[in-house]
Amino acid sequence: MSEKNVISVVNLTKRFGKFTAVDNISFDVKKGEIFAFLGPNGAGKTTTIRILITLLDPTEGQAFINGQNVIKEPANVRKAIGYVPQMISIDGSLTAYENLMLMASLYDVPRNRRKDRVSEVLDFLKLSQFSAKLAKNFSGGMIRKLEIGQAMLHCPEVLFLDEPTVGLDPVAKNNVWEHLLELRSQGTTIFFSTHNMEEAEAVADRVAIMNSGKISAMGQLSELKEKTEKKNASMEDVFVFFTGNSLHQMGDFQEIKRVRQAAQRLG
Ligand SMILES: Nc1ncnc2c1ncn2[C@@H]1O[C@H](COP(=O)(O)OP(=O)(O)OP(=O)(O)O)[C@@H](O)[C@H]1O
Ligand SMILES: [Mg+2]
């Protein structure tokens, strides 16, 4: 069972008009793995995730979740996945409890199980004491946890998280990851995107480095570091070696921009 591929991507391509956002990528993710999709802004991370979660059709190639074809069997795929989007997805004018109840019905948690399941999830995320609080008064870390709560209500096999810790302080980041690692220890497969090399290094079993729509390197970070043939290679060295680009500045600016947009949306 441990070798079972939960995500399989085969020669996947997505073009928007003449622009190729995802350029013939292939990879597999095994059950229970934490897999990081690393890359700068515009690399194609979100586009790939949208295809895998059935929100976008690929131009060419195929993708499977739990052996189900994302194009031909989207309903089955949706049952098997949870999704935490890059932009804020909770409703600030509802309480934590109400946000989860809303998603529980959307995710088809059986009506007579909803209240119990929402309580379980609030407990799991240590948000029970804030259950009746309006989400717009939550900190960034609590918002992210609530969004993870929404995505896990129907006990999905795979969680897709698009930049799950962007804009969070180190304490909140660690707290979010504590919960994700706990979910993984229960068998959930975790696929996340980030442009934070340190984060990928801290939690991922394997990474794929994406750049301009292509995967330029994939594997365990220790293997990728060895390939740079540099002593004590850092994550930054790995990225520069495989892509010829540096990550910094650009990511920081985008991060700030996004956090502000998120804050505005919550009002
Ligand atoms: N619906 C669309 N129409 C046209 N171009 C698009 C569309 N969606 C994405 N793109 C383009 O595809 C490229 C990849 O975008 P994508 O959002 O997948 O990147 P990303 O790796 O998630 O970047 P970021 O780190 O900024 O979130 C970008 O150049 C983007 O402008
Ligand atoms: Mg993105």
Image (cartoon, rainbow, N blue to C red):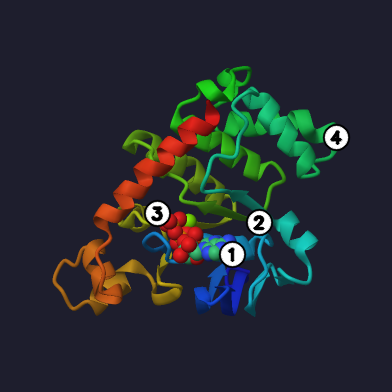
Residue name at image x 36 percent, y 49 percent: 254
Q: CA distance from mark 2 to mark 4?
A: 21 Å
Name the amino acid, label 1.
Lys
Q: Earlier in the sequence, mark 2 or mark 4?
A: 4
Residue found 73% across the figure and 31% down from its top: 101
* Three-letter code, disc 2: Glu
Whether residue 34 is visible, yes or no, is: no
For residue 157, the mark is 2
In space, the residues marked 3 and 1 are separated at their CA atoms by 16 Å
> Mark 3: few, some, or many residues within 10 Å (few <14, many ≥20)?
some
Of mark 1 and mark 4, the one earlier in the sequence is 1
Q: Quadrant of residue 5?
A: bottom right
Q: Quadrant of residue 128?
A: top right
Q: Residue furthest front?
A: 17
Residue to which mark 3 is pinned? 203
Disc on the earlier residue, 4 or 3:
4
What residue did someone put label 4 on? Answer: 111
Amino acid under disc 4: Arg
Dividing the picture into quadrants, the one containing residue 146 is top right
Which x, y percent locates residue 152?
A: 64, 44
Give residue 126's position: percent from left, percent from top. Answer: 54, 28
